[in-house]
Amino acid sequence: MWGWGQNLTVGVLRLQTVDGFVAFDLEGARMSAGGTRLAPDVSEQEIVELARAMTYKFAVLGDRLGGAKGGVRAHASDPAARADAMARYCAEIRPLVASRKFLTGPDLGTHEEDFAPIRDLAAVPSAISSTVDGVSFEDVVTGFGVAAAAEAALGGLTGRRVAIEGFGKVGGGVAREVVRRGGTVVAVSTVLGAVHDPGGLDVETLWKARRQMGDRCIEALGMAVAPTSALFDAPADVLVPGARTGAVDHLRAARIQAHAVVPAANVPYTAEGLRTLERRGIAAHADFICNAGAVIAYRSRPDAAPAQVLADVEARIRSLMGQAAGHPQGPFAGACEMAERFLATWRGDDLPEGRPLASAPPTFA
């Protein structure tokens, strides 16, 4: 079933062979793109919000693409069910990929190898399948970009304290890159709890434990494990939200002890959460800039070396952070205006109705 929203910009295609859907943000866009998220509770509203964020991400990067996002309801912890769901998903979206209506790749719960059945239609740069210091490039690039964004936001990471929500492939990558740049990771959370040490956590122990223990990796430090939400109480120079949409609502925004928020997750702010941060003087940076590393990488030259791709990711994100920083209403507003100016060059007055914030679900026709 397909339906366009009342604002004529959001459409959701519900799939028939798998419990999944694809959201397209811009009606009439020649091509749309965005990752595919897999989780047992992923919702259409979440995917719609993520598609809007992709529109803004492409716009700040100067790409005339519509935002899109895929969602598959399955348990990542069940390998057989997960593989079957992704195989069905790829088979059903194959015509969309072949027509260039929808280009997709990894997001939360998915990996590049999940999209092998459609890569004959949409190849990816060679760097994507490479490794950096023994770690898959996919697990490096987004976290690398977020750390570069944090460094740009603070004017340097040496001696700075960072709190990170989530320690999956992105959060782990952020943590390692923060340490490499001279920062200290003082708090980390997973769905099972949070750990905090003002003197700094042993990131390499967490990284190694994650491979065997998953979200229980925080137990490997031998520290007291607090509730997950305690992460937002940790004193830090920068907070990195890295989980699902709407994590920074007005209640959490009122508790945050960081000077800046640099998201790894897409659509982390609710409207009230963003206003609360602004009132408190906490710099809320745009997720669609901070976590743009993977999009920059996927749209790099086919033969670009991994080191060159990472250098390009850092240069683009630093430049965009600098352009957004001086806005009187804060860097998030600055980034949105940059995106909207570019969208107007090819959409005219037909712009998305609403910025990429977690909000009430739209009504579909």
Image (cartoon, grey):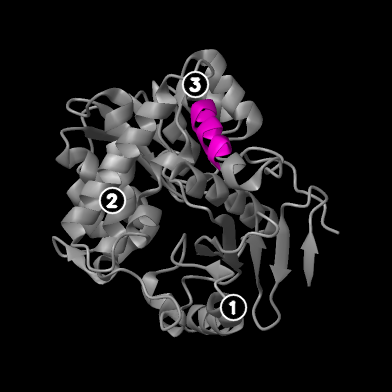
Indicate the position of residue 302 as horizontal and vertical percent values. Answer: 28, 68
Magenta segment, prevailing SS (helix, strand or loop): helix
Query: Spatial distance from mark 3 to mark 2, Cα to Cα?
Result: 27 Å
Query: Spatial distance from mark 3 to mark 1, Cα to Cα?
Result: 39 Å
Camera-near label (1 vs 2) is 1
- Going from N to C along the chain, the mark reached first, 3 or 2, is 2
- Extent of the magenta region: 332-342
Q: Secondary structure at mark 2?
A: helix
Indicate the position of residue 191 as horizontal and vertical percent values. Answer: 47, 50
Indicate the position of residue 230 as horizontal and vertical percent values. Answer: 45, 33
Q: Secondary structure at mark 1?
A: helix
Q: Is residue 113 magenta?
A: no
Along the horizontal axis of the image, is 181 left or right of 63? left
Q: Is residue 341 magenta?
A: yes
Name the residue located 51 percent from the left edge and 23 percent from the top edge: 255
Name the residue located 61 percent from the left edge and 69 percent from the top edge: 73
- Going from N to C along the chain, the mark reached first, 3 or 1, is 1
User: In the rendered image, which quarter contains the N terminus?
Assistant: bottom right
Of the pair 317 and 75, the residue shown nearer to us: 317
Along the horizontal axis of the image, is 20 left or right of 1? left
Indicate the position of residue 103 as horizontal and vertical percent values. Answer: 51, 68
Of the pair 52 and 227, the residue shown nearer to us: 52
Q: What residue sits right under mark 2 in the picture?
A: 173
Which image quadrant is residue 150 in? top left
Q: Secondary structure at mark 3?
A: loop
Q: Is residue 289 above or below residue 325?
A: below
Name the residue located 35 percent from the left edge and 50 percent from the top edge: 293
Camera-near label (3 vs 2) is 3
Residue 90 can be seen in this image = yes
> What type is the residue that disc 1 sits on?
Ile
How many numbered callouts?
3
> What type is the residue that disc 3 sits on?
Gly
